[in-house]
Amino acid sequence: MATTSRVRGFITLGLLPALLIYLVFVIVPIIWSAYYGFYDWKGIGASKFIGFDNYIEALKDPIFWKSFKNNLIIVGASIFGQVPIALVLSLILWKSTFFHRFVRSAVFMPMVVASVVIGIMWGYIYHPEIGILNFILDKVGLSSWIRDWLGDPKINMYSVSIPIIWANIGPYLILFIAAIQNIPSEVEDAAKIDGAVKARRLYLIVIPMIWDTIKVAIVLCISGSLKAFDLIYVMTGGGPAQATELLATYMYNNTFEIFRYGYGSAVSTLIIIISMFLVLGSQMLMKRK
């Protein structure tokens, strides 16, 4: 009993610094932001209490809802792009040979590159005049496909989704590989003896046994997509004419471009609320007995 209490004490002591840092730099700013959402405040000087006016104004603003729609496109692209690609790659690359480790490192590499660099790089790829994408399309005889990929409102949200997917596959790949490697070998051997082919083993063994990991990946996709900012800001700045505006860029522009800190705080709180509803909805849809 004394040993158990001592172990719990050590665990609590070890977690305490991380919990304090999380409390100070995450929880307190969220509460502070929600508080200032009820005020008309320009960042300096006196603040004026206005109740729910900032929230009502945001919900009535068509640009806010356009940003929300664009964010849903990013969320969908992340869930149906990053997770399946990472899952397929994890099934191929889960072994620990030199080749598999090299490819895993290559897939993970975008995560260690600054988002600004990735945004600039893809901006040049999509450039309508000097971009390599239009150059390749022209050389292979697909000149009719040449577009202003970031300037055309019909396709620019789908264009910016591709680098977001590409840059964030790595963490989910590592997550799924770790989950697959933790599947007991006895289960796999039993399935082989029973004559289950690879596709059947994937459907009946692998996916059910890593289902909780897939649910975690989808939660991370949703939360990460709703706070997507840097790539969009570097590539398009939310333009042209708010065509690629996201909730995070909408909040940034209102907070730091026109100095409406109270309104920006209200928008940030709405982003958290929307994120919670989407996460809860996804978990309800993914429930299984």
Image: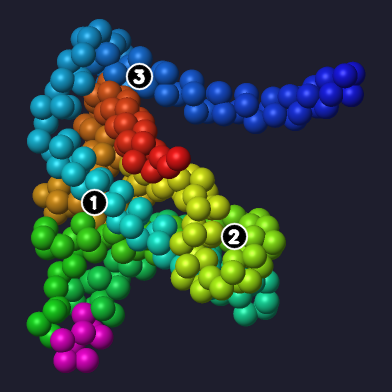
To which residue does mark 2 refer?
180
To which residue does mark 1 refer?
73
Residue 132 placement (x, y as % from top left): 28, 80
Callout 3 environment at 10 Å: few (<14), some (14 to 19), or many (20+)?
Answer: many
Q: Quadrant of the N terminus?
A: top right
Dot 3: element: helix
To which residue does mark 3 refer?
34
| Snapshot quadrant of residue 63 | top left
Tag 2: residue type?
Ile
Dot 2: element: helix
Marks 1/3: CA–CA distance: 26 Å
Q: Magenta stretch containing residue 226, yes or no?
A: no
Q: Is residue 266 above or below residue 203?
A: above
Tag 3: residue type?
Ala
Callout 1 environment at 10 Å: few (<14), some (14 to 19), or many (20+)?
Answer: some
Q: In this view, does 234 lie to the left or right of 135?
A: right
Q: Magenta stretch containing residue 140, yes or no?
A: yes
N-terminal label among 2 and 1: 1
- Which of these two is toward me, 126 or 208? 208
Dot 1: element: helix
> Residue placed farthest to the right in the image?
2
Residue 287 placement (x, y as % from top left): 41, 40
Please report the residue visible at 55 percent of the width from the left and 52 percent of the height from the top.
209
Residue 68 placement (x, y as % from top left): 21, 40
Tag 1: residue type?
Ile
- Which of these two is toward me, 160 or 262? 160
Secondary structure mainly formed by the magenta segment? helix
State yes or no: discs 1 and 3 in contact (Cβ < 8 Å).
no
- Please provide the residue range marked out in magenta: 134-142
Residue 31 placement (x, y as % from top left): 42, 18
Marks 2/1: CA–CA distance: 29 Å
